[in-house]
Amino acid sequence: MQISTGAQNSRIGDATIGGSGDLSISTGSGGMGKAGDILIRAGATLGADGSSASMKGGSSSAIGGSGGDAILAGGDVSSANGVAGSVLVGGGASTSTESATGGGVTVTSGPGSVSGPSGDVSVRTADGTLGESGSIVMSSGDSESATTGSLSITTGSGKIAGVLAVSQGDSAEGSGGPGVVVQSGNVMLGDAASVEVLAGSSAAGLGGAIRVEAGRGFSKGGNAEFSAGEGVTGGTARVSGGTGSQAGGQVVVASGVSTDAEGASGAVYVQSASGGYSGDVTVSTGDSTLDSGGVNIRTGASSGAAGDVVLVAGYSGTSAPRDGGNVVLEAGGSSAAGTSAGSISMSAG
């Protein structure tokens, strides 16, 4: 059955006191065959913009009332191993042979009053009882010969910007696998894209901080690992303080503290990887046009026994006979007139 309208308006009658009647549009049921579809569409036009098709819930002017909902739902299924119907929302397609843009899909909540909040937009799958709950997949489209579309998730701007949180749900049993993965795409030819984590800037206050913290565990806390990528030459892992107009930022590497009064704090290891030829470990301050910084190696003070400072050169084994490593202490030289070279001082406590 097809219902076509000209310049007319079909509606249910108004009600002054009680509720107005419902408007139900349905096709007949199918026995062994498929029931009929319902198609609602605006007419085509040749010389103007296409018309819109609107579906909107009813308005309410009652105090404390709520406007009516506009509900789109797929069909139910009652047979074993069946799949319930989906809700498909898509923009219009471009059928032109010339350059034309396809229609977009915009989901926007309703605006609030002058002092009231706007509505929320909630996207979630239904809960699962014995089976798994559904997934949510957000992706831009592929492109054969141009740049693919971007995917942006941002909070709105305002007096105080909202929080952007990405988190995995709680689990009764640990999975052991990755929970939150942030990864750029792989590239066949050329350089792969980077992953950047940037805190916000401030015109008058402190810049935002970046904090990476492993989770708390009953027996042992989680590890925090930073490693560069593999290659013919491995990538460099760099940690540096921020640039400042008066003084640069510091780099602090510290082990964890123990909450037990007699417990030991964690150790700090700085070493190159083992191999056929292990790499060097260099600790130096930067060059300076005025006075360069010092290198201080010291153990902490203690009410008990203080720690030692031990300098040991490497040992050479018998499998590949080589000389043992040397320990060299050398003071700095000076070429300026009226100055002297540095000295080496050694004293017991």
Image: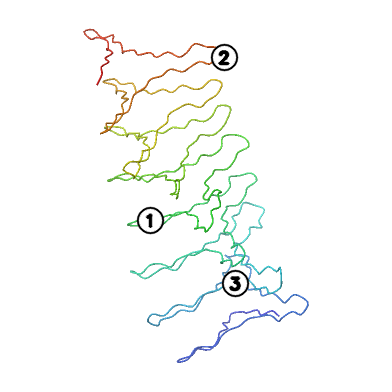
What percent of the width, then of the height, locates residue 318?
Answer: 55, 14
Q: Quadrant of the N terminus?
A: bottom right
Q: Which mark is residue 157?
A: 1
Q: Which mark is residue 216?
A: none
Task: Give the crowd class for mark 3: few <14, some 14-19, many >=20 residues within 10 Å.
Answer: few
Q: Which mark is residue 320?
A: 2
> 268 or 75, which lies in front?
268
Label 2 is placed on what type of residue?
Answer: Ala
Instruction: Name the residue at 38% across, 33% down.
Output: 240
User: Closer to the observer: label 2 or label 1?
Assistant: 2
Q: Is residue 56 left or right of residue 130?
A: left
Q: Is residue 198 above or below residue 285?
A: below
Mark 3–mark 2 Cα distance, whole angstroms, equals: 75 Å
Secondary structure of the residue carrying numbered label 3: loop
Instruction: Name the residue at 31% across, 32% down.
Output: 248
Secondary structure of the residue carrying numbered label 1: loop
